[in-house]
């Protein structure tokens, strides 16, 4: 390794390492469809999230799905849309979040869009359980730069969960 006099790793090596990690994760993360940015723009992040819910909630019975929400200016007006959707696992969508968020940040550099939120689904839980609430890892995601809104789309509504008091977190049943 190349070390500078203070003993820290040189920045070029860190940058190359991050690029390699993002590329490798991209090889194992399965996305569905393409980035629909040019297809539909919405007036609010809620409208974009509801459109995503209408598309992916029915597919979420056995696994989680996730997407990053973006804003961009169109004809002088801020519009919102969801990016590429990533297929997760039965109890998490962490690889899709990681890949979508990091590639989204790189994409933001080269476009006029901004990351504004994250949306994901929860699959149908086993009999006697419910998961129509934000988990502790879900709650952590709001700490990422640019994630101002967190949307959860549970496959079913148990009737036990309520909307969080923090208005940055929204459950779409």
Image: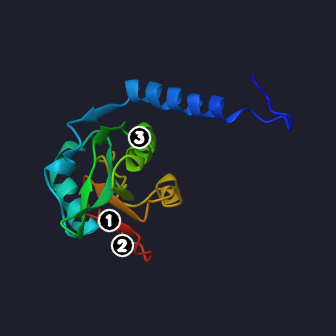
Q: Disc 1 marks which residue?
A: 171
Residue 133 drawn at (x, y percent): 39, 61
Q: Which quarter shows the C terminus?
A: bottom left
How much space separates mark 2 and mark 3, taking CA atoms?
A: 30 Å
Q: Nearer the viewer, mark 2 or mark 3?
A: 3
Picture layout, residue 28 above or below residue 163? above
Please report the residue visible at 37 percent of the width from the left and 30 percent of the height from the top: 29
Front residue of 167 and 89: 167
Q: Which quarter shows the N terminus?
A: top right
Counting labels gives 3
The label on residue 163 is 2
Q: Residues within 10 Å of mark 1 (few under 14, many from 20)?
A: many
Front residue of 29 and 23: 23
Q: Residues within 10 Å of mark 3 (few under 14, many from 20)?
A: some
How much space separates mark 1 and mark 2, taking CA atoms?
A: 6 Å
Circle 2/circle 3 CB separation < 8 Å: no
């Amino acid at each position: 390794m190349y070390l500078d006099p203070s003993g820290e790793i040189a920045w070029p090596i860190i940058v190359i390492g991050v690029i390699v990690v993002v590329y490798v994760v991209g090889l194992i993360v399965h996305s569905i469809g393409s980035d629909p940015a040019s297809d539909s723009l919405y007036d609010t992040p809620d409208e974009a999230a509801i459109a995503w819910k209408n598309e992916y909630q029915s597919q979420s019975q056995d696994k989680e799905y996730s997407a990053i929400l973006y804003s961009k200016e169109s004809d002088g007006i801020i519009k919102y849309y969801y990016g590429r959707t990533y297929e997760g696992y039965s109890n998490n969508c962490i690889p899709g979040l990681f890949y979508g968020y990091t590639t989204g940040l790189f994409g933001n550099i080269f476009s006029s869009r901004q990351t504004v939120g994250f949306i994901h689904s929860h699959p149908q839980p086993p009999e006697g359980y419910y998961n129509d609430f934000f988990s502790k890892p879900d709650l952590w995601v709001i700490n990422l730069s640019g994630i101002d809104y967190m949307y959860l789309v549970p496959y079913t509504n148990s009737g036990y969960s309520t909307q969080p008091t923090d208005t940055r977190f929204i459950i779409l049943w």
